[in-house]
Amino acid sequence: MLKKLVLVVSIVGIVQAGFSLTGAWAQMGSAGQDEVAPQPIADPFEPFNQAMLSFNLKLDEYILHPVASGYAAILPLGARQGVGRFFHNINIAPRLGNKLLQMKLVGAGKEVGRFVINTTLGGLGFFDAAGSWFGLEAGHADFGQTLAQYGISPGPYLVLPFFGPSTVRDAVGLGVDGAMQPMNYLLPTYPETIAARGGWVMGNAVNFRSLNLELFENVDRFSVDLYGAVQDGYLQQRERVVQDALSEQ
């Protein structure tokens, strides 16, 4: 049993790494288009962060990307996009919880409305009926964003093993968002929770990576300062997310 648990946790970590890194790379690629500049941030953990960046990139290179490529060869693009919408739909709990914590009552109402409409008319979320038919566009909220709204500074930059670029504040937020998942409390025992969470994370990560197979193709052009490029991209994207939260109703 212990060996099985260790294996599941390892697989979850590896897949989550690629999922987080893919998202971070996408953020880095679009960061230059954002007008919001991040405030200077301390980086006392740079040696650790450099090692974790290399570790996470290797996980993507040798595990996630090959799996996602095979998955993309089997499942058509439209189907994979539907799977992505499904995962977004069932991940309502952290978004709704953080909207309420941020006192964004209009945003919380939109989350509930989108979930009800897409779960019913949208076939469990595979189709975005709420956005297409009712104009309720998808939103985002996380606990790191919530902490920022209440004046908590980001703290030092931190690259997490398996989870990718972060800050101390966002790392705490990541743990709280995970605790908001209902499956943590609905499943009867710890192994079942790990297995279910692992299946969810693995499916979401592989699907997301399959939709972004080319994101790492230009890694060589950042080879002189890959660490700095990833850091800048992540911090710019997070600053934009925080500013969006502050301006939202």
Image (tube, grey):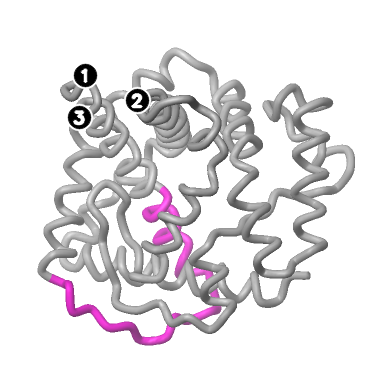
Looking at the image, residue 2 sits to the left or right of residue 66; the answer is: left
Which residue is located at x 41 percent, y 35 percent?
205
Classed neighbour count for the residue bearing mark 3: other residues with Cα under 10 Å, few (<14), some (14–19), many (≥20): few
Q: Is residue 26 magenta?
A: yes
Q: Earlier in the sequence, mark 3 or mark 2?
A: 3
Q: Residue at x 75, y 29 (%)?
A: 119
Q: Position of residue 117 (x, y in %)?
A: 83, 34
Q: Which residues are magenta?
A: 23-46
Q: x, y percentage for residue 22? A: 38, 46
User: Distance between the Cα atoms at labels 1 and 2?
Assistant: 9 Å
Mark linked to residue 1: 1
Look at the numbered disc 1 and give the secondary structure of its residue: loop
Mark 1 in CB contact with mark 2 (< 8 angstroms):
yes
Whole-Å distance between the Cαs marked 3 and 2?
A: 10 Å
**In this rendering, is residue 164 above or below 152?**
above
Q: Amino acid at mark 1?
A: Met
Which residue sits at x=65%, y=66%? 101
Q: Position of residue 69 (x, y in %)?
A: 35, 24
Position in image of residue 29 (x %, y %)? 42, 59
Q: Rate crowding at label 2 as few (under 14), some (14 to 19) or many (20 or more) other CA atoms within 10 Å.
A: some
Residue 149, compared with residue 60, is above or below; it is below
Nearer to us: label 3 or label 2: 2
Q: Is residue 70 left or right of residue 93?
A: left
Q: Amino acid at mark 2?
A: Pro
Q: Secondary structure at mark 2?
A: helix
Q: Which mark is residue 6?
A: 3
The foreground one among 66 and 4 is 4
Q: CA distance from mark 1 to mark 3?
A: 9 Å
Farthest right residue? 134
Q: Earlier in the sequence, mark 1 or mark 3?
A: 1
Residue wearing tag 2 = 191
